[in-house]
């Protein structure tokens, strides 16, 4: 008799077990667990399905200082764009989020202009996107369009050279303001590299890499549009530690009162400066046998420069002499501090930790 017939004739037989001793689920139970079976509560979302969906999301690392940078950018852009357009311009920050670069490129509504800019000091790139509504608004305002009228849109055609140049002027203003917004934290220069209209030609990092996306809304009277700034985490890596700090205030935590007080106290500090006339190895036996009048010969001559030290650290070279009947030294040169073995080990360890960090 076949095995299937035996199973049908023995309904009370135990269910088959897997290799690890656990009960194996049939297809109906699997469908029910994943939420595919309507008979088992189609309205309730399965926890496993939620976990599978959330696994594709980006874990947004909170960067408190970045919020303050973009808040400063909004204020700077409001003034700069008013000077550029001679119109009443209001800039607002919709939100800051974290997305994967590939997902963001696929979500850009076309037509649009994609500006690729480079952070010179960080040697990496970012992306600034201007939507079609803002493009036609900027062109209409800069070319003297009437206020209170919506900009005329002509869909289905590429942007002309004049339109590209006018939008490029606005992008330059925005990047200059973005550089100024980062200045209190870390000086950086953002330079526009090129403008693209096809997202495939605007790839600045791998599609799976994450980045910070800031969406800005620009209102010019009855007309409005959006600017989106996408900065990969790899670009922000050089200042990541600074962005993680919790600073308050416009000056990013700098306390001028405390700095002035600390400077004054440091200037009042007494430092013992020693003039080392010479050094020579002497055995302990000879030192114990020294008597009044004993002499020790040094290799230093009268015209040689002596070393001035603060503790164990050499600071200056000087020449000896007399002034008003007292011994004196005349400082000649400053001695640059040399790196010790401990400093080199710390620098090598810090470099290793930086290389071990993966991209977001």
Image (tube, helix red, strand yellow):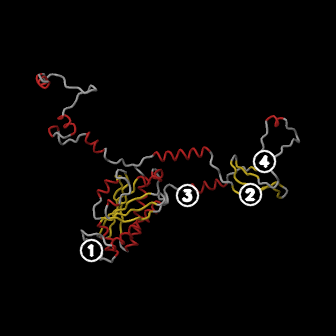
For label 3, the crowd category at 10 Å Cα-Cα, with few meaning under 14, some 14 to 19 and many 20 or more, is few
Determine contact: label 1, label 2, CB under 8 Å: no
Residue at the disc numbered 1: 149
Q: Nearer the viewer, mark 4 or mark 2?
A: 4
Residue at the disc numbered 2: 331
Residue furthest to the front in view is 1
For label 2, the crowd category at 10 Å Cα-Cα, with few meaning under 14, some 14 to 19 and many 20 or more, is some
Which residue is drawn at the image coordinates 74% and 49% (left, top)?
274
Among numbered discs 1 and 2, the one appearing first in the sequence: 1
Residue at the disc numbered 3: 256
Residue at the disc numbered 4: 278
Look at the picture and state if 238 lies above or below 115.
above
Could you say which is closer to the camera, residue 198 or residue 219? Answer: 198
Look at the picture and state if 71 lies above or below 210.
below
Q: Secondary structure at mark 3?
A: helix
Q: Is residue 249 left or right of residue 8?
A: right
The quarter of the picture where the N terminus appears is: top left
Give the x, y percent position of residue 8.
11, 25
Give the x, y percent position of residue 268.
67, 54
Q: Nearer the viewer, mark 1 or mark 3?
A: 1
Q: Secondary structure at mark 4?
A: loop
Q: CA distance from mark 3 to mark 4?
A: 44 Å
Q: Is residue 277 left or right of residue 240?
A: right
Q: CA distance from mark 1 to mark 3?
A: 49 Å
Could you say which is closer to the camera, residue 249 or residue 332? Answer: 332
Among numbered discs 4 and 1, the one appearing first in the sequence: 1
Among numbered discs 1 and 3, the one appearing first in the sequence: 1
């Amino acid at each position: 008799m076949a095995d299937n017939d035996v199973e049908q004739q023995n309904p009370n037989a135990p269910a088959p077990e897997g290799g690890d001793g656990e009960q194996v689920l049939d297809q109906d139970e699997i469908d029910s667990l994943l939420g595919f079976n309507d008979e088992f509560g189609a309205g309730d979302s399965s926890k496993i399905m939620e976990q599978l969906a959330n696994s594709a999301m980006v874990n947004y690392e909170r960067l408190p200082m970045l919020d303050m940078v973009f808040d400063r950018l909004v204020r700077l852009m409001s003034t700069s764009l008013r000077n550029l357009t001679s119109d009443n311009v209001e800039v607002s920050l919709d939100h800051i989020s974290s997305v994967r670069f590939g997902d963001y490129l696929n979500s850009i509504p076309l037509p649009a202009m994609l500006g690729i800019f480079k952070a010179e000091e960080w040697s990496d790139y970012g992306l600034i996107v201007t939507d079609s509504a803002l493009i036609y608004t900027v062109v209409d305002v800069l070319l003297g369009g009437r206020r209170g009228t919506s900009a005329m849109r002509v869909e289905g055609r590429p942007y002309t050279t004049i339109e590209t140049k006018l939008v490029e002027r606005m992008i330059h203003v925005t990047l200059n303001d973005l550089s100024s917004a980062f200045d209190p934290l870390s000086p950086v220069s953002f330079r526009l590299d090129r403008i693209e209209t096809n997202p495939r030609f605007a790839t600045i990092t791998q599609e799976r890499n994450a980045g910070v996306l800031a969406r800005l809304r620009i209102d010019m009277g009855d007309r409005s549009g959006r600017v989106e700034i996408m900065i990969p985490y790899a670009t922000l890596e050089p200042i990541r530690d600074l962005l993680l700090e919790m600073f308050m205030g416009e000056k990013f935590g700098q306390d001028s009162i405390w700095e002035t007080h600390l400077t004054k106290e440091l200037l009042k500090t007494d430092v013992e400066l020693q003039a080392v006339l010479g050094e020579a190895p002497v055995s302990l036996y000879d030192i114990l046998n020294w008597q009044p009048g004993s002499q020790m010969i040094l290799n230093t001559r009268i015209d040689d420069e002596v070393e001035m030290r603060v503790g164990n650290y050499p600071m200056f070279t000087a020449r000896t002499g007399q002034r008003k009947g007292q011994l004196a030294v005349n400082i000649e040169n400053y001695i640059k501090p040399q790196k010790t073995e401990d400093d080199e080990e710390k620098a090598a360890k810090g470099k290793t930790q930086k290389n071990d960090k993966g991209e977001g």
